[in-house]
Amino acid sequence: IAAVRRAGGTVVPLLAGAIRHAERVALAMDSRAFGAHPQRTERTRIPFRTRDWCFMVAFWLVSAALLWRSLAA
């Protein structure tokens, strides 16, 4: 009976610690908006659109023109 009584004395502090830890985890998840969106932000597909290709081509053309100009001078 003494062993059961000693074990029973540790149950309350362990339970209190578990509840405090669960509260901290819940607050952290809530502050990070966990579960607010159907899927995680870093796992969404970002489409590569026509305007992205146009920007890349324009960037490389301007870069090549500036390089050509600096080499010709």
Image: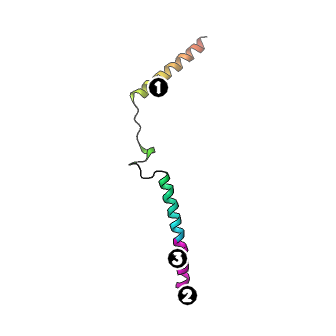
Mark 3–mark 1 distance (CA, rounded to whole Å): 64 Å
Which residue is rendered at x = 46% and y = 51% of the image? 33
Specify whether 28 is left or right of 38.
Answer: right
Extreme residue toward the bottom, this view: 1
Which of 27/71 is in front?
27
Mark found first going from the N terminus, 3 or 1: 3
Residue ID for mark 2: 2
The residue type indicated by label 1 comes to Met
**Mark linked to residue 11:** 3
The residue type indicated by label 3 comes to Val
* Disc 3, SS: helix
**Mark linked to residue 56:** 1
Extreme residue toward the right, this view: 73
Q: Give the answer, above or below, for where 33 lies relative to 55.
A: below
| Magenta highlight range | 1-15
Which residue is rendered at x = 49% and y = 19% of the image? 61
| SS majority, magenta | helix
The residue type indicated by label 2 comes to Ala
Which of 69/44 is in front?
44
Q: Give the answer, above or below, for where 71 lies relative to 31.
A: above
Which of 64/20 is in front?
20
Q: Is residue 3 magenta?
A: yes
* Disc 1, SS: helix
Q: Where is residue 20 in the image (x, y as percent from the top left)?
A: 53, 65
Mark found first going from the N terminus, 3 or 2: 2
Mark 1–mark 2 distance (CA, rounded to whole Å): 77 Å
Which residue is rendered at x = 43% and y = 47% of the image? 40
Q: Quadrant of the C terminus?
A: top right
Which residue is rendered at x = 40% and y = 40% of the image? 45
